Amino acid sequence: MTSLTSLLVFSFLLASWAASTIQADDDQSIEETSSTVSNYTQLSYIPKPGKKLTMNKIDICWRSNPQWSWHRRALADCAVGFGKEAVGGKYGATYVVIDPSDDPINPKPGTLRYGVIQNEPLWIIFEKDMVIVLENELMVNSFKTIDGRGVNVEIAYGPCITVHDVSYVIIHGISIHDCKPGKPGLVRSSPEHVGHRVGCDGDGIDIYSSSNIWIDHCFLARCTDGLLDVIHGSTAITISNNYFTQHDKVMLLGHNDHFKADKIMKVTVVFNHFGPGLVQRMPRVRLGYAHVANNMYDEWLMYAIGGSANPTIFSEGNYFTASNDPNIKEVDLLLVWQITKRESHGGWKTWKWRSSRDEFQNGAYFVQSGWGSCAPNYSQSQSFKVDIGSMVPALTSYAGPLRCVAGKPC
């Protein structure tokens, strides 16, 4: 591990230099710092500078500190909901990605893959803006933070991210789009292990048999399969402050109707913006529990929240706007306006699906079912205030990767 130790020392010095360099140039405009983002990742969803800042509970925790770039690990204390304990690389060294190239079998020091496969905790940051085209799926090891703040980082045009059989991972501030299926072949998942992979489906992020995972302030769009899947007994997950757009099957929670291990699944979906061009699965839940709170829904072309195999879904304080597409036939409007869809051969009326303090626009409506409490029963550290639905446009106005400049509040 001598090479890693040397690289981490270099990474620390580089991170210190980069932070001081950026801070010295903090008069540079936000528009200038984002000018190198590829044309494929549109940042029109980010509010214009000068707009009155409204922060949700997660963002209040760290964004007001102008020295955020010197205190990056403070982010690890800011999650809410079931993924609260996702500390990522909080207790590890800083690793700086300086090279966007990729080798799935023998990754080079300085590349993203080399950092995420290490066994020890690491807080991974990026030297500069970069577009990373992976040669095969990126296998993320436990106790890792991928932190894209201060630069514009895209993972796109190839296979994307797999979080498989690991714990305590944070992925923050990354644009993930146009993901493609992976090819069968060898992929390294740790310094000691190279395994044969059958080829991923082309998801943006695939969370598989994992726990204590937090996905925050990412942009996800236009992948071959789903944008974000939580499957195969994964639990203790928070999905927050992300911007989803231009996709069919957005978010799947639960592998299939017969995979009973997914009964343990608990997922918090909070402060996300489900933008234009989405069709369904925001989320689609099987067997487990989902607390869907304070999210913004611009439209859906089939349904917003769906499920099968008797999941429990608590929709609380969301803002639902049904589509007003003039091409939709009048006879179909009632179906399109419905937020919910259950796939069942009967008996769904006993499923616990509840709506509380949601805001409904353009005729949107939520079909409730079941009886008894479906509250998330968070621990004290996991709990957070859920605002009424009318507050959601403000609470989610900064969803997606932020334009952070060192030396200024983000």
Image (cartoon, rainbow, N blue to C red):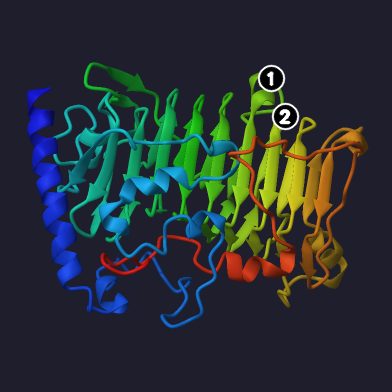
Q: Are marks 2 and 1 in contact (CB under 8 Å)?
A: yes
Q: Residue at x 59, y 65 (%)?
A: 395
Q: Amino acid at mark 2?
A: Leu
Q: Residue at x 54, y 70 (%)?
A: 54
Categorize mark 1 by other alpha carbons within 10 Å: few (<14), some (14-19), many (20+): some
Q: Amino acid at mark 1?
A: Lys
Distance (Cα) linking label 2 and label 1: 7 Å
Observer-nearest of 209 and 384: 384
Q: Which mark is residue 287?
A: 2
Above or below, 52 against 22 in this view is below
* Relative to 139, 168 lies left or right: right
Q: Which mark is residue 385?
A: none
Q: Residue at x 49, y 27 (%)?
A: 210
* Relative to 331, 89 lies left or right: left
Q: Is residue 321 visible?
A: no
Horizontal and vertical percent for residue 127?
Answer: 18, 54
Observer-nearest of 355 and 306: 355
Q: Secondary structure at mark 1?
A: helix
In the rendered structure, which disc, 2 or 1, sits on the residue that comes first in sequence? Answer: 1
Q: Is residue 1 visible?
A: yes
Q: Quadrant of the C terminus?
A: bottom left
Observer-nearest of 310 and 267: 267
Horizontal and vertical percent for residue 218?
Answer: 44, 54
Outermost top residue: 192
Above or below, 246 against 211 in this view is below
Horizontal and vertical percent for residue 56?
Answer: 56, 61
Q: Quadrant of the N terminus?
A: top left
Q: Which residue is mark 1?
A: 260
User: In terms of image quadrants, where is residue 392?
Assistant: bottom right
Q: Secondary structure at mark 2?
A: loop
* Relative to 349, 265 lies left or right: left
